[in-house]
Every structure is written in C-alpha cells, then in structure tokens.
Amino acid sequence: MVNRSWSERVKHLRKTLNLSQEDFAHRIGVSFQTVNRRENRGTEPRSKPIRSVIETLEQELLDK
C-alpha cells in the first residue's frame, strides 16, 4: 500500500473496512470533510497522528 497515493490509500482502506466516509471519519477522529478531501484531492494528511492511524489500520489489515 505504500506505493499508492494518499487518495487511493484512504479510499481503499475505508472500503476494505466497509465504512462510509462519515463512519470512517468518526473511527479515525476527523471530520467527514477531511476524509472527503483526502479521497478526492489526494492530499497527504497534515496531522502526523492521522497519518499514523491510517498506517496502523493498513498494517492491521495486512496482518489478517
């Protein structure tokens, strides 16, 4: 997953978890707008904790 853009990573992770953008946002502690921007603009999260949460969730999925 490391070679994917942030947009692809966030969207893939959210869909793999079978969550809406709103539910995913709630799970990682950000607003719906933040998730929507990441998926549609592909911008890297500015907050290090948000990046860490996304990377941790990705790793948990890989470990399954």
Image (cartoon, rainbow, N blue to C red):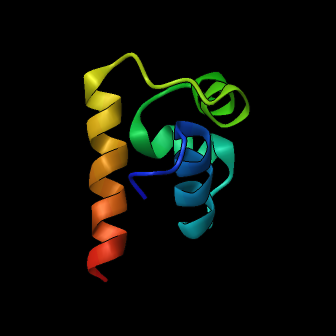
Side (left or right) of 30 relative to 15: left
Q: Position of residue 55 (x, y in %)?
A: 31, 48
Q: Position of residue 37 (x, y in %)?
A: 66, 25
Q: Position of residue 19 (x, y in %)?
A: 62, 58
Q: Residue pushed farthest right?
A: 40
Q: Give above or below for 1 relative to 32.
A: below
**How many numbered callouts?**
0
Q: Quadrant of residue 33?
A: top right
Q: Which is more toward the observer, 15 or 4? A: 4
Side (left or right) of 4 relative to 56: right
Determine the residue positioned at 68% across, 31% down: 36
Q: Position of residue 11 (x, y in %)?
A: 62, 50
Q: Give above or below for 32 relative to 60.
A: above
Q: Quadrant of residue 18?
A: bottom right
Determine the residue positioned at 36% across, 59% down: 58
Determine the residue positioned at 66% across, 44% down: 21
Q: Give above or below for 44 relative to 19.
A: above
Q: Residue pushed farthest top?
A: 46
Quarter of the picture containing the C terminus is: bottom left
Determine the residue positioned at 73% across, 32% down: 40
Q: Residue pushed farthest front?
A: 3
